Image: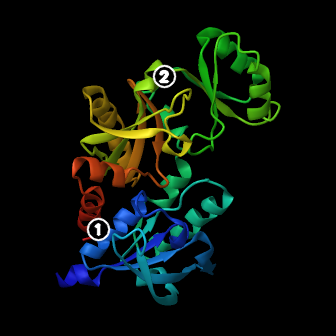
């Protein structure tokens, strides 16, 4: 018990004041840490700096409770290097912009100093959440990535009903469905590719989206037994909760588990210990490595303790 009490958890995240504690997966991790008696400190990207090869952090130590009206109290602000923490969680929400990228480079120096960071910063940086899925070709639908308008039009001609989306989007933003003989096809392609200068993804439309875009959480490559099917609202093709979808928990199918078995070993190899994959019908569409969500919804619906299971694994990982 003394070892548990000694743990100091650092979390790089959005400002603590801005989160919705009823929905926030990072907050679920804080509650699980508090149950273990861990000290919890939070910081934003702007609180990270580098002094030669030493990562310095301005952090706020907090206490938390599961009360949406009074969910945290500050215990003061401090500054120190990465070694003041037993482990650091990188839990900043997208967008995955250059500020995010530079933060992962700085967090590399925490690992050099002996403080483990989860997920591994270099792997977060390397694994674009849409492109990474294409490393598993047997799991994904027909898809191309290009900035060439002619190639995109040819793909649409082949499949008639497709999805176009940016490679750096989040929350269902800027995702377009282009159906047969869509008169807006050219302007959508021109806009998303910025007149042929920016690569985007074109994917065959998967009709099973009406049954939900299922988020499956994996801890060290092993799936949580239930996923959250995010079902599009009427007239929508996007199931993202941020785009108005509704979440329904469901048991994983055999195909879901097969996909997880395909992906899991690579996640473990890359130090991606908490990941959310998105599955529509029989197909993997994204692998979310930055700040996967849906813990709170699944815990509430299915009586799970996903954050607790994750911290249990991290305890074993860091010894």
Q: Quadrant of the N terminus?
A: bottom left
Q: Is residue 7 visible?
A: yes
The residue closer to the viewer here, 269 or 175, is 175
Measuring from the top left, give residue 132's x and y in whole percent: 50, 39
Measuring from the top left, give residue 271's x and y in whole percent: 39, 55
Spatial separation of the CA atoms under disc 1 and disc 2: 37 Å
Up-down relation of residue 236 to residue 10 (above or below): above
Measuring from the top left, give residue 232's x and y in whole percent: 49, 32
Secondary structure beneath label 1: helix
Neighbour tally class for label 2: few under 14, some 14-19, many 20 plus, Cα within 10 Å? some
Up-down relation of residue 64 to residue 22 (above or below): below
Residue under label 2, please give it: 141
The residue under the point 61% across, 78% down is 50
Q: Earlier in the sequence, mark 1 or mark 2?
A: 1
Residue under label 1, please give it: 32
Up-down relation of residue 190 to residue 51 (above or below): above
* Cβ atoms at labels 1 and 2 below 8 Å apart: no
Q: Quadrant of the C terminus?
A: bottom left
């Amino acid at each position: 018990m003394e070892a548990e009490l000694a743990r100091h958890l650092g979390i790089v995240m959005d400002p603590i004041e801005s989160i919705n504690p009823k929905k926030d997966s990072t907050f679920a991790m804080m509650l699980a840490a508090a149950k273990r008696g861990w000290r919890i400190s939070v910081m934003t990207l702007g609180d990270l700096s580098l002094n030669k090869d030493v990562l310095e952090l301005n952090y706020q130590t907090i206490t938390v409770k599961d009360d949406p009206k009074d969910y945290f109290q500050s215990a003061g602000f401090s500054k120190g290097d990465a070694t003041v923490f037993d482990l650091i969680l990188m839990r900043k929400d997208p967008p995955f912009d250059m500020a995010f990228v530079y933060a992962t480079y700085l967090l590399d120096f925490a690992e050099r100093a002996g403080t483990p960071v989860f997920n591994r910063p270099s792997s977060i940086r390397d694994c674009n959440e849409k492109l990474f899925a294409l490393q598993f070709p047997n799991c994904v639908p027909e898809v191309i990535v290009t900035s060439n308008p002619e190639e995109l039009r040819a793909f649409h001609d082949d499949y008639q009903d497709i999805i176009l989306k940016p490679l750096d989007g989040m929350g269902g933003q800027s995702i377009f469905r282009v159906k047969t003989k869509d008169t807006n096809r050219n302007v959508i392609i021109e806009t998303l590719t910025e007149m042929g200068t920016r690569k985007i993804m074109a994917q065959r439309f998967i009709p099973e989206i009406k049954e939900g875009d299922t988020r499956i959480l994996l801890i060290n490559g092993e799936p949580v037994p239930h996923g959250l099917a995010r079902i599009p609202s009427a007239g929508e093709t996007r199931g993202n909760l941020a785009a108005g979808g509704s979440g329904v928990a469901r048991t994983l199918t055999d195909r879901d588990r097969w996909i997880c078995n395909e992906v899991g070993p690579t996640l473990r190899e890359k130090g991606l210990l908490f990941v959310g994959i998105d599955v529509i019908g029989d197909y993997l569409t994204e692998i979310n490595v930055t700040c996967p969500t849906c813990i709170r919804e699944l815990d509430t619906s299915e009586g799970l303790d996903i954050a607790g299971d994750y911290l249990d694994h991290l305890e074993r990982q860091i010894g």
